[in-house]
Image (cartoon, rainbow, N blue to C red):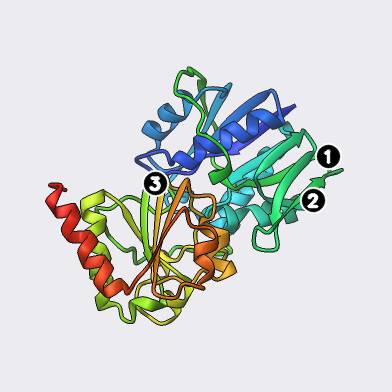
Amino acid sequence: MTTLVIAEHNTVKLNDATAKTVTAATKIGADVHVLVVGSGVDAVAEAASKIDGVAKVIVADDAIYAHPLAENLAALVVGMAGSYDAIVSPATTIGKNFMPRVAALLDVAQISEIQGVVSADTFERPIYAGNAVQTVKSKDAKKVITVRTTAFAAAGQGGSAAIEKVAAGDQPGLSEWVSENLTKSDRPELTSAKIIISGGRGMQSGDNFHMLDSIADKLGAAVGASRAAVDAGFVPNDYQVGQTGKVVAPELYIAVGISGAIQHLAGMKDSKVIVAINKDEEAPIFQVADFGLVADLFTAVPELDAELGKLGL
């Protein structure tokens, strides 16, 4: 059984989600190939070739893939699908965008956000906002799967896979790239950060999020937010952690002024250590927190910032 993993990258660097997806893929099939799609992606392909468990890296390097349009990606992947029993991608924004199109074009059911592999055709995935785990067995000849990467460890870096280049696929012409507006930050990405400090509705305003920025800078952390804070306009939506935002599993997650709605818990409850600061001692966040502080965040957060400063951070 051969599995094709679609690499996630930013043209320059391979996303850690790819190595985690390879770990899942090796549990599905013996041979794992990685497809790197983009423009000027030689460095990414080289990095992919070093991932343990990868037998071959396939590179589609063309100007039409300079931006990851779902229609172009899907056309390429579907054109290659005949050689593979399973097609796997990280359940990231990009993966969630083009993989359903791949499944539709292949006329198979997508298996979304798996967090466990029972066998080559049986998988575990969360349902009901992560409150239950569903075991799914697929009878489709080809499996189209997205992986919840927080559930898998990253594969090692001892590989030496061969790199093979392929021609670009058809360009459907159904969409075109116009522009993008990205939040620029020196902080780590939410999905790869080892420490995250998030604020909720209790922050009261976007200006108050600067208190979290100071702590994040000292800890080398990413800054996140609950959906309530995003909907209130305190921060941009790329800060959102939760069922409809980003799923994270850092080593340390600090929740400030977050009540702990089920949608938010679904996106962060797999964090190794959870710290909650909230003045409401009945807040649901305390049910999943390893450490909880019942206090006014406008007192507790400056005190935490000051203590970190005393440590020279």
Q: Are marks 3 and 2 in contact (CB under 8 Å)?
A: no
Residue 141 is tagged as: 1
Q: Is residue 36 visible?
A: no
Q: How many marks?
A: 3
* Residue most extreme to the right: 139
Image position of 275 (left or right of 166): left
Residue at left offset 31%, top offset 81%: 205
Q: Is residue 69 left or right of residue 206?
A: right
In the depicted structure, whether residue 245 falls above or below residue 9: below
Q: CA distance from mark 2 to mark 1?
A: 8 Å
Q: Say few, some or many: other residues with alpha carbon within 10 Å of mark 2 (under 14 / 14 to 19 / 20 or more).
A: some
Residue type indicated by callout 3:
Asn
Left or right placement of residue 273 versus residue 217 in this view: right
Q: Nearer the viewer, residue 171 or 59?
A: 59
Helix or strand or loop: what does disc 3 sit on?
A: loop
Q: Dot 3 surroundings within 10 Å: few (below 14), some, or many (20 or more)?
A: few
Foreground residue among 199 and 191 = 199
Q: Position of residue 218 (x, y in %)?
A: 21, 52
Q: CA distance from mark 3 to mark 2?
A: 29 Å
> x, y (%) of residue 261?
55, 71
- Which residue occupies 79% across, 40% down? 122
Q: Are marks 2 and 1 in contact (CB under 8 Å)?
A: yes
- Mark on residue 108? 2
* 110 relative position to 21: left or right: right
Q: Residue at 64% across / 28% down in the picture?
A: 26
Please report whichever mark, 1 or 3, sits nearer to the chain's N-terminal start: 3
Amino acid on which the number 1 mark rests in the picture: Ala
The location of residue 47, given as percent across then percent down, is: 41, 29
